[in-house]
Image: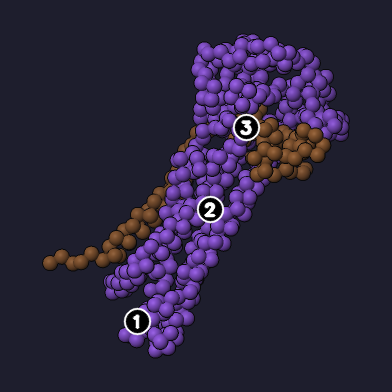
Chain colours: A brown, B purple
Amino acid sequence: MTLPLRPSHFALPALVILLLLFTLSLADAAWRSRTVDQTAQRTLVRELGLSDLALFTEARYTRHPTQADRHTPFQDHPTALEHFPTGSLLPPHPLD
Amino acid sequence: MHTFLEQQKYLIDYTLAALLRRKTRNLGLLLVYTLLVFLFSSVLLLSQGLRREAALLLQDAPEVIVQKLVAGRHDLLPAAWLEPLRRIRGVNRVEGRLWGYYYDPAVKANYTLMVAPERGLAVNDILIGASLARVRQLGVGDYLSLRTTLGQPLPLKVAGVLDSASELLSADLMLLSEAGYRQLFNLPLEVYTDAVLTVRNPREARTVAGKIALAMPDSRPILREEILRTYDAVFHWREGMVFITLGSLLLAFMILAWDKAAGLSAEEKREIGILKAIGWETGDILRLKLWEGALLSLTAFLAGYTLAYWQVFYGGARLFAPVLKGWAVLYPEFQLTPTVDFSQILALLAVTVLPYLVATLIPGWRAAISDPDAVMRG
């Protein structure tokens, strides 16, 4: 005689699988952050003296936020509004 | 122990059967809940990953960069400045750099042009970033024609494509020779874009920067620690901005969850009344409600977080590309090194799982401590 299937027979293994995937993601992060090789990128930074990530290439003050002065976003005329989309998410250059 | 586990399994069976009776409502809630955790986790993991990448890669950025300012704006630095900078006590080496931007109307993209003296490039040779090569469909040996400041076309031969592993740094880079750069922008020999300094004792970099600012009042020294601080601030800010936007979503979800969990329907109250009448203890009802909240919120949390992890670290964070990209044409393809902060996972758990558990337990407990007869009669 076979016992009827209970909802917990599906739910508990599903929860265990999810928990396992979550644990795997933690293990993956720990392992990859230790084994990743960034020598080539760091050599390029040293060789060229790079100061910024090429993440936001639409305007020069978002391409090189560390090199831009506080006037750059409003460069067109004295009362110009800053208008690039990523600029609206970038904070002003920190004050020293 | 075995009895305890069996009891919990029966409670889970009962909870799931109850949840499945209102299948559409509970599945909808689970989907929205998972999406919410996914969005919050994605933002958290992406900004954390980018922050770590910036801190790791830019730790080799120049110790001090000196710019010349005119009326508050970055101007070309005279070559005559290099010698006085070299004479400042504590300065080890000074080099003038040449770099700038070129807007290519053909693809509406901005390139970052940079002179790479160590690469020994011929006058018309260039090395380009992988993203630029992709957008312009260029390979080694192809020619790219740029228009000089004087309006003449300048044909440049692609001598190589930079490694795509460094795209986060070099997506829009075009490396060229000093002669080629000066010819393109018609720059005289006696100017540079800025100067980079190495300092004998890195701990004295701030003092050296102070001396430069004093000796050359129209200069702007930028320290490596400021570069790193800027990136830290940039990603914190972005994270905060997105969280504010997502905050409204969280509030909407909280109202939905509170309405679903806190406002027990007459049917649910009658069910609790019947369970009490047939001999269930208040503790059993609370365990039942705890399982109901835990099953739903833990499934949503684990599924949402795992999906976010996969999307950010294995899927190239494509979901957020439009936000990061803005109007840019060149966008790097990058794979971030995964990084996990346990305190942030705990904070995420506290914000998403805990409120739902509380919203499920309290009304269940209130109904469970009432008289079964009164509860059943409503």
From the viewer's side, name the closer residue of B254 and B60: B254
Q: Is residue B29 visible?
A: yes
Q: Closest to the observer: B88 or A21?
A: A21
Q: In the rendered structure, which amino acid carries the disc numbered 3?
A: Thr
- Disc 1 marks which residue? B275
Closer to the chain start, of discs 1 and 2, is: 2
**Residue B177, position as x, y percentages in the image:** 65, 15
Q: Do marks 1 and 2 both belong to one polypeptide chain? A: yes
Q: Residues within 10 Å of mark 3 (few under 14, many from 20)?
A: many
Q: Chain of mark 2?
A: B
Which residue occupies 43% across, 57% down? B31
Chain to which the residue tagged by mark 3 belongs: A
Disc 2 designates what residue?
Answer: B40
| Residue in the image at 73% along x and 13% along y | B150
The three-letter amino acid code for the residue at tag 2 is Phe
Residue A51 higher or lower than B123, as above or below: below
Q: Are marks 1 and 2 in contact (CB under 8 Å)?
A: no
Residue at 73% x, 28% y: name it: B197
Residue B24, image quadrant: bottom left
Q: Quadrant of residue B30?
A: bottom left
Residue wearing tag 3: A57
Q: CA distance from mark 3 to mark 1?
A: 63 Å
**Left or right of B161, for residue B225:** right
C-alpha span from label 3 to label 2: 26 Å
Instruction: Tell me the distance, in whole angstroms, between the alpha carbons under discs 1 and 2.
Output: 38 Å
> Element type at marker 1?
helix
Q: Label 1 amino acid?
A: Leu
Q: For mark 2, give the secondary structure.
A: helix
- Residue B198: x percent and y percent? 72, 28
Judge the density around disc 1: few (<14), some (14-19), many (≥20) Cα neighbours within 10 Å.
Answer: some
